[in-house]
Image (spheres, rainbow, N blue to C red):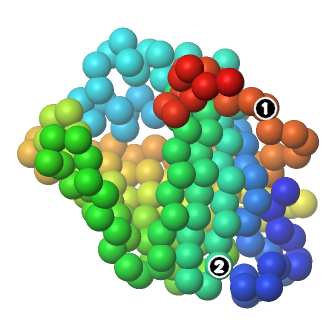
Amino acid sequence: MPTIGVGEPDVPMPSALGTMNGTWRLDKLRGKPSMRGYLETMGVPELAIEAHEKGEEDHETIHTIEFSDSHFKIKKQSRVTDMGLDLKLGEECLANLPGDRVKTTIATTENPGQQVKIVSRMPTMNGMANVVDTKTLQREGNLLVLVQTLTIKNELSGKEHTTTRYFVPHEGALIPLAATAKGSVGKK
């Protein structure tokens, strides 16, 4: 469960709000959590977008976050995603992709533990894209909510899309990863 009031030793506690450290579940009833516009901007084929939407509709989307003074680490799990990202704050990270392609990513924060901005430049199916993924912790009554604002802009076409998704604290055991997510095919 996300930290409320007491932080891990290396995580400063800037206020009574707490930190985003912990496990979060996508709130499918709030806002428009569909990734359709994001995927369309990347040039993903319609059939794959429909499969992604079905996967998120039928299964939980879970983000597990570890956020310290110097690092932001996230594990994203869903029916269609099984990926992790570990970034040193303020340091550009280069990832080599198949076909001599490179993705650059940098994470920064103005409020450690409560806000992070991840800026990426990556190749997509229809050219290079710039992505800004901002995660902000906020309190709504007695509930902590992690708000994700994800903006993608295709450099070639100029097409841009913003998706806002809301995550709530996940309680209980994590369900096993679906067999279709990356990295789990054929594994037991």
Nearest the viewer among 81 and 169 is: 81
Residue most toward the top?
Answer: 47
Nearest the viewer among 77 and 19 is: 77
SS class, disc 2: loop
Disc 1 and disc 2 in contact, CB within 8 angstroms: no
- What residue is disc 2 on? 68
Nearest the viewer among 80 and 96 is: 96
In the picture, which quadrant includes the C terminus?
Answer: top right
Residue 82 locus on image (x, y percent):
55, 38
**Label 1 CA crowd tier, 10 Å (few <14, some 14–19, many 20+):** few
**Label 2 CA crowd tier, 10 Å (few <14, some 14–19, many 20+):** many
Count of numbered circles in the view:
2
> Which of the 4 image quarters holds residue 159?
top left
Residue 157 locus on image (x, y percent):
11, 41
Which one is earlier in the sequence, the residue at label 1 or at label 2?
A: 2
Asked if one can make out residue 152 in the rendered structure from this viewpoint, the answer is yes
**Where residue 114 is drawn, which disc sits there?**
none
- What residue is disc 1 on? 175
Q: CA distance from mark 1 to mark 2?
A: 26 Å
Residue 157 appears left or right of 184: left
Residue 145 appears left or right of 32: right
Circle 2: residue type: Ser
Give the residue drawn at x 44%, y 51%.
150
> Which of the 4 image quarters holds residue 19?
bottom right
Residue 63 appears left or right of 173: left
Asked if one can make out residue 128 in the rendered structure from this viewpoint, the answer is no
Residue 68 locus on image (x, y percent):
65, 79
SS class, disc 1: loop
Circle 1: residue type: Ile
In the picture, which quadrant includes the N terminus?
Answer: bottom right
Give the residue drawn at x 88%, y 77%.
5
> Which of the 4 image quarters holds residue 70?
bottom right
